[in-house]
Image (cartoon, rainbow, N blue to C red):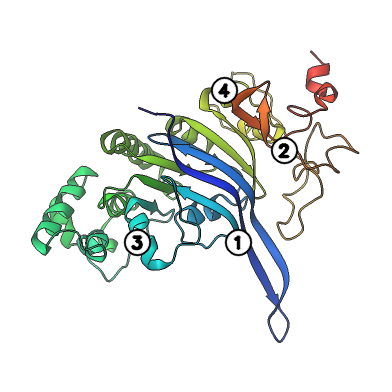
Amino acid sequence: MTVSTPLIEIKDLVKEFPVKGGLLQRTVATVNAVSGVNLTIRRGETVGLVGESGCGKTTLGRALVRLLEPTSGSIIFDGVDITHLKSKDLKPFRRRAQIVFQDPYSSLDPRTQVGSSIAEGLRIHGVSEKDERHERVQEMLELVGLHASHASRYPHEFSGGQRQRIGLARALILRPDFIVADEPVSALDVSVQAQVLNLLKELQSELHLTMLFVAHNLAVVEHMSDRVAVMYLGKIVEITDRDQLYSNPLHPYTEALLSAIPIPDPDRPRSATILQGEVPSPIDPPSGCYFHPRCPIGQKGICDVEEPELRPIENDLQRLAACHLRTGDYQDLDPRRLAR
């Protein structure tokens, strides 16, 4: 059951990557991968994080578990600011927060038996003796739908779906409170995707997990999430309850993403929002609203000048959007509202 207590609080998180050039490899530009993100994840809930490729989803997820060092901002985990903790002080957090990587092929060491890979976290954190670790690995393999005897095999002996289950077992062996699932099914066949997603939901319920589920497939996110955060060019542009987002999206970018979801019924009428142009470069993002060069309702003199604040809609603190024409002082200029 989802409760209101926050487990993760992200405040003004920024992650930048320097671009080196020249003979002396000086910094010539900066990639703004994550730009001032604010997000709260409550205990026991799954927050879906969606957006186009290159929008900063994976960078945000990796920064949350401190695989990447944030440039600025703060990450508060269970009341403790872990943003700048050193390796020794960070160790208790790493036991409680794990990540499932996108690629089930490159995320496993091909020269290591999967049982040893899964047990590595137990060894690092000094959990239990060798015989007990072996038993826990076998139990975890069976929990994710594999056989205990698979512990002695190598990654190349498994299919993609089985490897992703091994990745899940490795992340869950320490019984963490929080998991970042970084597009865990995007590299899998559709039939296998369903198996892994259903397994994730079962494990979340059984182990009381809190999860950030990163994906670009909104149909998958709808199945998995309690709330959804939409990301564009390093910024969160909308956060709301799953049902509200899919039935009545606020941000024009969210509308465009939803209109691109395939519908398995050729006779069902649908209206598609076709975005013009390409995603701007994170090295040189546009002024004002980052989305305004592609926005179908953007207004010159407003959207290209003023950066919109992520703010509640109609005093609903659980529904936030960053759009001048949907939540700001210029709502009366929204063409969709004027057409009603």
Question: At which x and y percent is residue 224?
Answer: 43, 33
Pick out the residue farthest to the left. Answer: 131
**Which is nearer the eye, 120 or 73?**
73
Quadrant where the N terminus lies? top left
Quadrant where the C terminus lies? top right
Q: Which residue is mark 2?
A: 309
Pick out the residue farthest to the top. Answer: 340
Going from N to C along the chain, the mark reached first, 2 or 3, is 3
Going from N to C along the chain, the mark reached first, 2 or 4, is 4
Look at the picture and state if 129 lies above or below 187.
Answer: below
Q: Which residue is mark 4?
A: 244
Question: At which x and y percent is residue 172?
Answer: 28, 49
Which corner quadrant of the image does residue 331 belong to? Answer: top right
Please, what secondary structure does the residue beneath circle 4 have?
A: helix
Going from N to C along the chain, the mark reached first, 1 or 4, is 1
- Examine the rendering and report whether any part of residue 231 can be seen: yes
**For the residue carrying disc 1, how many other residues have a C-alpha within 10 Å: few (<14), some (14-19), or many (20+)?**
some
Please, what secondary structure does the residue beneath circle 1 have?
A: loop
Going from N to C along the chain, the mark reached first, 3 or 4, is 3
**For the residue carrying disc 2, how many other residues have a C-alpha within 10 Å: few (<14), some (14-19), or many (20+)?**
some
- What is the C-alpha distance between the residues marked 1 and 2? 21 Å
What residue appears at the point 43 percent right and 66 percent down from the top-left corner? 86
**Which is nearer the eye, 50 or 317?**
317
Going from N to C along the chain, the mark reached first, 1 or 2, is 1
Amino acid residing under circle 3: Lys
